[in-house]
Image (cartoon, rainbow, N blue to C red):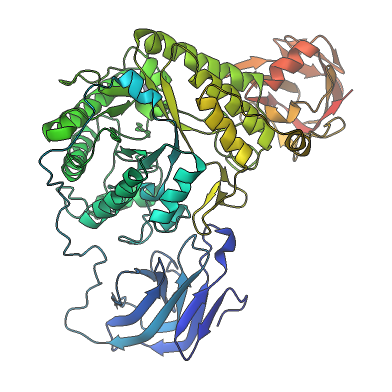
Amino acid sequence: MNDDKTAAFDKTTKTVTVTANDKLQYGGSKGIYLWLNNLDISSYNIARVKYKVIGDYGFHFTLDYDDNTLDWNYDKSTYCPSYLNEMIIPLKSNQRRLKGINAAGTWNVPYEQFVIESVTFEKVDNPKLTDVYASNEPPVIDKATSGKFDDKISAWDYVKNLGVGFQYQSFATCEDSLDYGMDCFHFWGFKKPSKEIIHFIKEKGFKTIRLQTSPNGGHLLDENYTIDPRYIKALKEVVDWIIEEDMYVIICGSVPEFMELNETFQKKVKESVHFEALSVSEDYKKTTEALLKAIWKQYATAFNNSYDERLIFETINNPTHIFHEHAWDPISDCAVCKKDYAIMNEYNQIIVDTIRSTGGNNAKRFIMVEGIGGKWKSITNSLFKMPTDKTKDRLIPTAQKLPMGFTLATAPGGFGSIFYTEGVRKEINAMFDALDKTYFKKHVPVYLSEVCGGPLGIPVMERINCMKDFMSEVAKDGRSCAITLHPADDYQNNSHDFDPWNIKWNEKSEYFDTVFYGAQGKEYPLSEEFLKNNETKVESIVGKNLINEPFDTKKWGENYRINSDIFLRSVPENYKLEFVIKKTGSSPTIQITWEDENFQWHKIPGTAKKIKGGRLLDGNVIPSKTTFTVEIDSETAKIIENSNALFLMGQDAIIQSMTVVE
Ligand SMILES: [Zn+2]
């Protein structure tokens, strides 16, 4: 049964059709449930599921034991992959009764069909879960003994040829909740890769495709870090399609960023050979080095002489010391960060040496080299060292820059800008100034491997204006720079700029064209009509209370954050902030601060001229009444607009409201 008609079961063909996930919702796993009325299973030890999948992905099969302490996903469900026809699932020995069984589509797949031939309960001698990783696939080895390669081209000229890249993230996904084997592409909403998809990307105007990979996110087979040959084979197939389209292709080492962010992954690393951590830290150095060596030995053996200079290797994606407080923004005067810089340099050196050791075209292949967190500051910092390389002029420093962020600032936990502000522009300039100094002025090119004008939920003209300015910097004389465009995701509707299921773009053409033209140093002419229809409309916030619910300052123990985007183009040049408070102690104090781009806080009334209903002490407001106003002059208004956010703190008071008044 299925109450909300998101899945159907055809009794004659035994086919389950799941149609619910048209919005690719996370956890949008819909299916059919068969009641078994607390079936006694105590004399069996396995469930045997015979099935056939029609399409790309398998399904979640759930044994719904009569035990509420069990987790539906982790304890009761098993993934039945598309490339098998039978799964043997041992029954939990301490369970006697089954409420029912459930068969549901897998995450983020909008439509899928599978046939369940039979489900039988049996007693067997050796109850063992079917291994979804087992295969007879031999290692993937590039056997060509020679191949062409443009030896003459300099790194400087090479990067200029790369055009605009597209970040195709199929191979980057990692899921640790269940064993998904080779059905690994759907977690971020991807259909299995196809020639048609690659051609479609090429047709749009992209010249390079960047493939992030995650071999250690569920594709290792043993403790020697042997990568599932099927994974490398699938990667190779896509690389070959890209080369056939006469495009450049970047194979990026591994995506470590989410590897240590959640506890289930940490658990998997401990318990399963299929997963391994990757961290820029003393604690993980030994395992990470062995892992990086193993990954690159296998990649470089699978991709060598058959590939000319159009195949590029990139050492790693966003490597961090995730358990350290400066994980994403390492600082020079921290002993741990200093050490991490040295470790990162060693990692890059190991990768370059491993690639070069495979000889052939890999002895001269271009290699992009990343720093900690993929941040530009970590490749312009003097603690960062480019690896030494026997081959001259073949290493390209690489960073990532998402000037508008990539999650909606209005979403829970989101950050980034809603509007393209002077502050964002300043950050872009700061990056290019630093890259000029460290690289371009020394005739060293820089590749920006992830750039995005922000998520789809923010006004398109903001994203277009941002990318127009960004690309004019990329294409400026005296620089050799190119970018890969990171997907603009719509985090509210969980969809991407590229819809692989229907092979269409959800993004406006004008956005892409702005980037393509910009890469050639030109400005894409937007039509009058487009400009008129897409003008960013901002509602006035005068009279609006900016506090969602009364905020208790709890003796400096808490702070209340107000994203500064809300003040952009929505307030008059000068205005007042009117506070209504409730006293909870004898010395009520309110502090209003703004945060700069380096996350430093500055008090506001210090620059504001007037306070009514209170007085100033050490830059804080000491209210004499329960309603007070702080005047914000035009200069302070500009500061607030371009800050990261406003923060409210204090003591002995609950802030009931903060309203913008004229
Ligand atoms: Zn540090």
Residue drawn at the location 38% of the way across and 67% of the way down: 75
Q: Closer to the camera, 490 or 159?
A: 159
Residue drawn at the location 25% of the way across and 25% of the way down: 343
Of all residues, the one furthest to the left in this rendering is: 145
The quadrant holding residue 514 is: top right
198 relative to 507 in the view: left or right? left
Q: Quadrant of the C terminus?
A: top right
Of all residues, the one furthest to the right in this rendering is: 662
Residue drawn at the location 28% of the way across and 89% of the way down: 43
Q: Provide residue 319's location: percent of width, then percent of height.
A: 34, 33
Q: Closer to the camera, 67 or 413?
A: 413
Residue drawn at the location 31% of the way across and 34% of the way down: 316
Of all residues, the one furthest to the bottom in this rendering is: 12
Q: Closer to the camera, 340 or 94?
A: 340
Q: Quadrant of the N terminus?
A: bottom right
Q: Quadrant of ligand 1?
A: top left
Q: Provide residue 364's location: percent of width, then percent of height.
A: 19, 27
Label total for image: 0
Is residue 337 visible in the rendered image? The answer is no
Q: Provide residue 543's location: percent of width, then percent of height.
A: 87, 32
615 relative to 229 in the view: left or right? right
* Rendered view: 96 above or below 280: below
Is residue 246 visible in the rendered image? The answer is yes
* Rendered view: 8 above or below 82: below
* Rendered view: 642 above or below 619: below
Q: Closer to the camera, 516 or 464?
A: 516
422 relative to 284 in the view: left or right? right
* Rendered view: 527 above or below 388: below
